[in-house]
Image: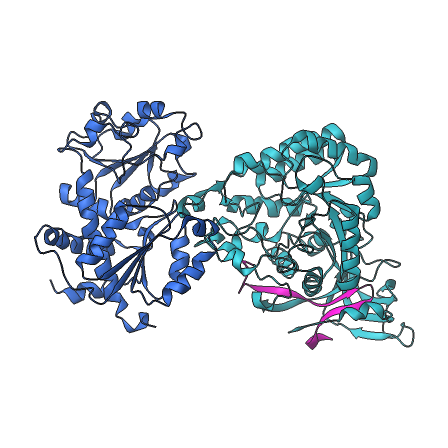
Chain colours: A blue, B cyan
Amino acid sequence: MPRDVKLLSFSHRHLLGIEDLSPDDINLLLDLADTYVALNRRAEKKRDLLRGRTQINMFFESSTRTRTSFELAGKRLGADVINMAPSTSAIKKGETLVDTAATLNAMHPDLLIVRHPDSGAVKLLARSVRAAVINAGDGSHEHPTQALLDALTIRRRLGRLSGLTVAICGDIAHSRVARSNILLLNTMGARVRLVAPPTLLPPRVDRYGVEVHHDMTEGLKDADIVMMLRLQTERMQGSFVPSQREYFQFYGLTYEKIAHARSDALIMHPGPMNRGIEIDSEVADDINRSAILDQVEMGVAVRQACLELLTGNLDHPEHNQ
Amino acid sequence: MTPRLADISIKKRKAERTAYLDLRLIDPASRRDETGGILTDGETIVDLGPQVTHESIPPATTVIDARGLIAAPGLVDLRAHLREPGFEHQETIHTASRSAAVGGVTSIACMPTTRPTIDDVSLVHFIERRARETSLVKIHPVAAVTQGRKGTQLTELGLLGEAGALAFSDGPRPIMNANVLRRALSYGTVFDALIMHHAEDLDLTGDGVMNSGETATRLGLEGMAPEAETIMIARDIRLAEMTGGRLHFSSITTAESADLVRQARARGLPVSADTAPHYLVLNESAVGDYLTFTKVRPPLRCEEDRQALVAALAEGVIDAVVSAHEPRDQDSKRQPFAQAAFGIVGLETLLPLVLEIVASGRLGLVDALALVTCRPADLLGLKAGRLAVGGPADIVLIDPSMTWRIDNQAFQSKSKNSPFEGRTVTGRVVRTVVSGRTVMDIASTS
């Protein structure tokens, strides 16, 4: 398939959220990512598509796996990759964000990968830089590359996205992963169910074309995919749920609960996992059902695809000033 | 179209005898709506009505021929944050007064959201002195209900009132302790004090930054439930009933809040309420893509609430529309939404936005003007807000057909934080007269 035709059909300057993507955009990204999965399994993984390009990973919030994944993706494509972790005191003020953007701009990076604890912050930064920006997670808003890597994982295992029933379980209210996944799965024609206690659901979420369940066995019934979300420790101590023990009892994924899903249902988790809180260790490690390590592998490939497509657009003259 | 503002030295000059002729005179207090003229001498109105014509006026009178314009009382703003003392980089009494003059606001009740807060007689005197020295319009301080606006100990309501504080408010900080508000209302009855309260249960709003609802969910922002407002209003109405104190709700924003106020009134309680234009013409969807200029406390609500508020205005349940002028500098708004400051500047957009509601057919012009003139003046016990012989010559001339675009950079306010940038509105104040002196006019019309 002729590559340049594909590149031209991806019209976005930044990747800020799934909200902006059409089904064609998503298919294009996933198709391209597929080619990287194969490449990454070879001994010689390096390409030089991004040679001479500078990629800066700016993580205003700590992260190991996402940052490493982006770093690897950039390096395998030949970019010069720099990691910056602005100090927490600087972020607390927040006021440095627009200044930070101006400072970065002066260094002429081509790609900026940004994670920030505030919803909308990555968009704010993208408005004042010339580089292509990838949102690596902003507050409780979006984490588009996570949704894309989840979609790639599902597509490779089950061959499609449309028509599947996906149960997303856990702290939906504070989850950017949940928001991006709801948007992507709805766009691609999957059926989305949310399973959580009411305290962990955002207001009026029923208006987003999802089914809402408070009971895990009902929510998992005949599901093709069970996506577990991480519950932050500070939310387990009485403010949102009474205790870890109680949460695990009613919302932790166990063999008993997953028996209600389809017998070949796939288990996913964006990591890092809280074993014994949202997921039973045995379930997490079940190689027949758990796709958790696939997700990590797909992450690198999806991010390579994103970097390639956005860099392709960087060369268009209208984006060059 | 560029407003021309008077120099502050105008206050030292004698106000000339002036006739404003051939106007549509609207005085909401007396429901007057007729063609005629106004004659002012010194700082007061000396004649008013169809009998005031070119022929009738005495010699040596300055004549303002204003055919096609509406003459109304100068606007009375029940709530503006002027930021002086303490935050002069955002606004001063002087710059706010220029902003007010452009917006046709001739009297401002200014909030104690200053540093130090206005909780002491000396600060009331300070505001009055700064107003005398630097303001083109009339400024009336509102003092804090509690010391340092901390919600625990009452200020000297009686002494502050004697010094000139027209009302009491802790600004956008609710008095969470019901017993403190109870005592304020109860003790305040001795002085007939008006207690203005921002009704919000802070435990319920938590870290919320916008209305709790569909838009907040889409944007991944923490929501503030409308119930945080209504629960507090329900509590406060009980306290007003218990004490007989005069309670005023600052910026009610939900359908249910309006219902509660309506019911309290029906029971004969001394309860009043205001709201601001942004709650009447915008809803939460205006937040769009994290537009921090729409971040305001209480937050913009859903469309059903907006419509219910407009209906409550028409019905008379809401007593005043206020500017809620809250200047914020660029840096405090160029932030991720959760970090950005709350607040919208409003002095220059108050009237055109109220006229926008009139144009929608939901509210009559005279009733609309009452909400920004005599009704807030009555709450504050001011003689302003009406066109009456013997009353202050605070007058605005409005060109009701002038269509213009709101341009934040053209604001006289030091701060430009308005979500109405670029909005096309109809109706503009073309002359503002304070105590018989023109403090602002728009050149092409004089």
Q: Quadrant of the N terminus of chain A?
A: bottom left
**Taking A74 as reference, is B188 left or right?**
right
The residue at the point 52 percent across, 56 percent down is B333
**Taking A277 as reference, is B82 left or right?**
right
List the single residue furthest toward the left: A43
List the single residue furthest toward the right: B58
Q: Is residue A219 magenta?
A: no
Nearer the observer, A19 or A244: A244
Total marks in image: 0
**Taking B92 as reference, is B418 left or right?**
left
The residue at the point 53 percent across, 56 percent down is B332
**Taking B278 as reference, is B159 left or right?**
right
- Magenta stretch: give its range: B418-446
Vertical arrangement, residue A131 with respect to residue A279, above or below: below
Nearer the observer, A96 or B352: A96
Vertical arrangement, residue A210 with respect to residue B432, above or below: above
The residue at the point 24 percent across, 54 percent down is A71
Q: Quadrant of the C terminus of chain A?
A: bottom left
